[in-house]
Amino acid sequence: MLVKKLKGHVLPLTNCCFNKNGDKFITGSYDRTCKLWDTNTGNLVHSFEGHKNAVYCMGFNVPYGNKVCTGSFDETAKVWDTVTGKLLSTYSGHTGEVVAISFDPNGLLVATGSMDCTAKLWDVEMGKIHSTLKGHEG
């Protein structure tokens, strides 16, 4: 049974993700945005705008939930504050689409995987690259 239909993106979704408590979730879209929703009310909390291509992957910094990271076909990842909706950092350095993303359990690092056959670790506090992992063939 359909409980609620949420409207917010103008193009199809690429992915979605719940926070640890399940009271918030994020959606990414080909419309180049990521949206944060209140699960209980269905209300839009924030719209994260700034990517130049589809937002393909996203994740919360579990267990805290005060940040989300988004990965895009524009070859960047971005970290956003879920309370204020503000952009905190943009990670540039991949030469292919960012298709996988995850915070470490302490929320100190973000891992990104790209179609450029590399994975990168980013220091969340400094907003800079920590290391690059090479050797993948696809």
Image (spheres, grey):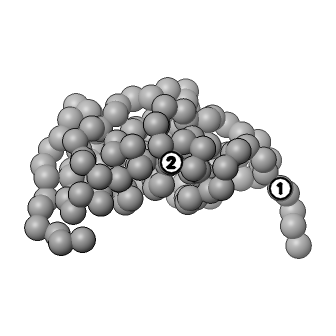
* Residue occupying image coordinates x 70% and y 45%: 10
Rendered position, 32 above or below 100: above
Q: Nearer the viewer, residue 56 or 23?
A: 56
Q: Which residue is mark 2?
A: 54
> Which quadrant holds the N terminus?
bottom right
The amino acid sitting under disc 2 is Ala
Q: Secondary structure at mark 1?
A: loop
Measured as percent of width and height from the top left, residue 53 is found at: 47, 43
Q: Secondary structure at mark 2?
A: loop
The amino acid sitting under disc 1 is Lys
9 horizontally vs 14: left or right: right
Q: Is residue 63 visible?
A: no
Measured as percent of width and height from the top left, residue 117 is found at: 21, 62
Measured as percent of width and height from the top left, residue 69 is found at: 42, 45
Q: Is residue 124 visible?
A: yes
Mark positioned earlier in the residue sequence (2 or 1):
1
* Residue occupying image coordinates x 56% and y 58%: 14
Residue 76 picture quarter: top left
* Residue occupying image coordinates x 50% and y 48%: 54
> Which quadrant holds the C terminus?
bottom left
- Mark linked to residue 94: none
Residue 119 picture quarter: bottom left
Crowding at label 2, few (<14), some or many (≥20) Cα neighbours within 10 Å? many
Q: Which residue is mark 1?
A: 5
Residue 108 picture quarter: top left
Label 2 – label 1 distance at C-alpha: 22 Å
In this view, the mark in front (2 or 1): 2
Crowding at label 1, few (<14), some or many (≥20) Cα neighbours within 10 Å? few
Rendered position, 70 above or below 119: above
